Structure formats: C-alpha cells, structure tokens
Amino acid sequence: MLRAFSSAAVAWLALVGVAFAAGEAEHPEDHAFSFDSPLGSYDMAAVQRGFQVYQQVCAACHAMTHLSYRHLGERGGPFSLYMVRNHETGEMEPYIGKPHHGGSFVSPTENPYLRAIASGVTISDIDPSTGQPVDRPGRVSDRFRSPFPNEIAARASNGGAYPVDLSVITKARHYGADYIYALLTGYTGASEGVLYENRYFPGGMIAMAQPLNEGQIAYSDPNTPQTVEQYAADVTHFLQWAADPHMEERKRLGIMVIAFLLALTGLLFLAYKQVWRGESH
C-alpha cells in the first residue's frame, strides 16, 4: 500500500514538474519607456503612432471596450485640440496636444481630427425609426468598434482562441508594458500548426500569429524607423496611455503633495523647537 502511494506521489510530482516547465517563459527585459520614472510622462508622438498601429493591425481582432473615441480628444489625450494664437499673424490656429503656454481647449465634439477618426469606422446600430439593424459612420461618442459581435464569433474566427480586450492590458499583465513589448518582439519564426513560438509567452507557444513586420505601417514622419521594435514600442505607449490616461496628472499631484508635506514637516519642526526652546530634555 505504501509502495503504491509512493509511486503515485512520484508520478504526480513528475506531472507537476512537467506542467511548471511547460509554463516557463523568459522574463521581459526593462524597456526605456518615457512614462516609467516617477517624473515620467507620455511621449504623445509615440502614443499617436501607437494608435495608428492599433487601428491598422490590432483592431482587426482585439477590442477596447472601455474606450470611446472622445477619450482621444480629452485633455491629456493624444489628439486633444487647442486653438493657439499665432504671434506673427495674430490669428488663432489649431494645435494638437497641450501647448507650452496659453491656448483654448476645443471640446472633443468640435474636434475635426477626432471626428475624422470616428467617422472612419463603421458602427452597427439600430435604426430608431424602424428598429432594424443598420451600419453607420462612427461618432465621437461611440465606443471603439469591436471587431466581432460576440465571443462565439471571435473564437470561430481565431481557431478557438479568444482575442483579449486591450483596454487595460498593461495593467492586467505582470511586468505591464515591458511584457507587451517583449511579447510583440519575441516571435522566433517557428510554428506548430496554428501555434507560434514566442519566447515570452507561458508555454512558449501562442495562438496569435506574429502581428508586426518590417515596413508594415507607413508613418507620416520619415525619420521614424518602420521596424518591428518601433511599432511594438509605439503601440505599447498607446496601450499604456489607454490603461492609465490620467497618469501625468496623478504624478503632478503626487509631487505637489510631497512638497507640501516636506514644507509642513519643516514648519512643525521649527514650531517644536520654538515651543520647547527653554525646556531641558
């Protein structure tokens, strides 16, 4: 009886060992993102390019159900619009992104760049007059278009695999942005059936084919490299912003609070010295 129990235990431990070995993956290296440090901020040019990568590549399979197109044009968004006075001509001119000083913020509903982005997608809706399904151009108030109507359709189109929602993916994964960048650049080129080898995915095989390739997306800036590494860094910037759009505001508030507490500590120490100046301790 004891021998049978020991054999079963050894077999169980062996299976556990195989399972752990199958789940091993390389740890992603630290990538130098502009938002990493306590004083870091978003590189909005990278966020804008990352949105382009998402639109042209990732949006074919992955939804971002927590985002609406208006979020892109809100204060701190990659396509926020300000009207800034040209000091040479005296006329008000559009400026994408927060200007260095001055400027009048334009509401997302009045932002022509945002309207162009939203109207570039087709949204399935219900006609309020007939109750019948219709397709219409997107509006600024719409949520990001989902590529599939439901999970069943998504799995049927991806060999049984369900493409994850990317709204907060950098917050939902261990190592965050570093993991996303490593995953996108970790394909080895090997595959087995519908699985593809990736050094950073648990088990080493992933159902998603390599999504990024050299020269796949044409950037408007000719000085920006059109490489897999650049695409991966840019779309990771965008996904990090999507998961934490108020990061810069929170960091600024944190610095103000720390400065206030330091000043308060100094004042309390001076008050302590004044009150107990004539007393021996």
Image: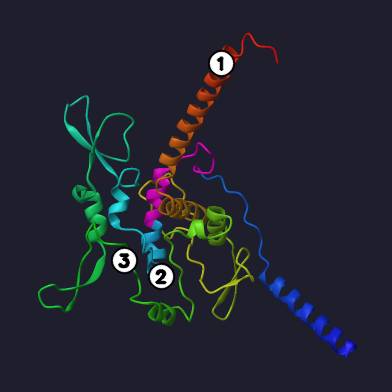
Q: Residues within 10 Å of mark 3 (few under 14, many from 20)?
A: many
* Side of 113 relative to 31 (left or right): left
From the image, tell me which residue sits under label 3. 145
Residue 254 pos. (x, y %)? 47, 36
Disc with the residue nearer the chain's start (3 vs 1): 3
In this rendering, the answer to whether 176 lies above or below 162 is above
Is 37 included in the stretch rendered in magenta?
Answer: yes
Give, as a single range, the part of the protein colored magenta.
34-52
Q: Residue furthest front?
A: 279
Q: Residues within 10 Å of mark 2 (few under 14, many from 20)?
A: some
Are the two marked residues, 3 and 1, in contact with CB atoms closer than 8 angstroms? no
In this rendering, the answer to whether 254 lies above or below 128 is above
For the C terminus, which image quadrant?
top right
Q: Nearer the viewer, residue 217 or 106?
A: 106
From the image, tell me which residue sits under label 2. 61
- The amino acid beneath tag 3 is Arg
Helix or strand or loop: what does disc 2 sit on? Answer: loop
Q: Nearer the viewer, residue 47 or 265?
A: 265
* Side of 248 relative to 111 (left or right): right
Residue 154 pos. (x, y %)? 40, 77
For the N terminus, which image quadrant?
bottom right
Q: What is the CA distance from the residue labelled 3 to the residue labelled 1? A: 59 Å
Disc with the residue nearer the chain's start (2 vs 3): 2
Disc with the residue nearer the chain's start (1 vs 2): 2
Of circles 3 and 1, the one toward us is: 1
From the image, tell me which residue sits under label 1. 270
Helix or strand or loop: what does disc 3 sit on? Answer: loop
Residue at x-position 31% and y-position 58%: 68
Of circles 1 and 2, the one toward us is: 1
* Side of 51 relative to 197 (left or right): left
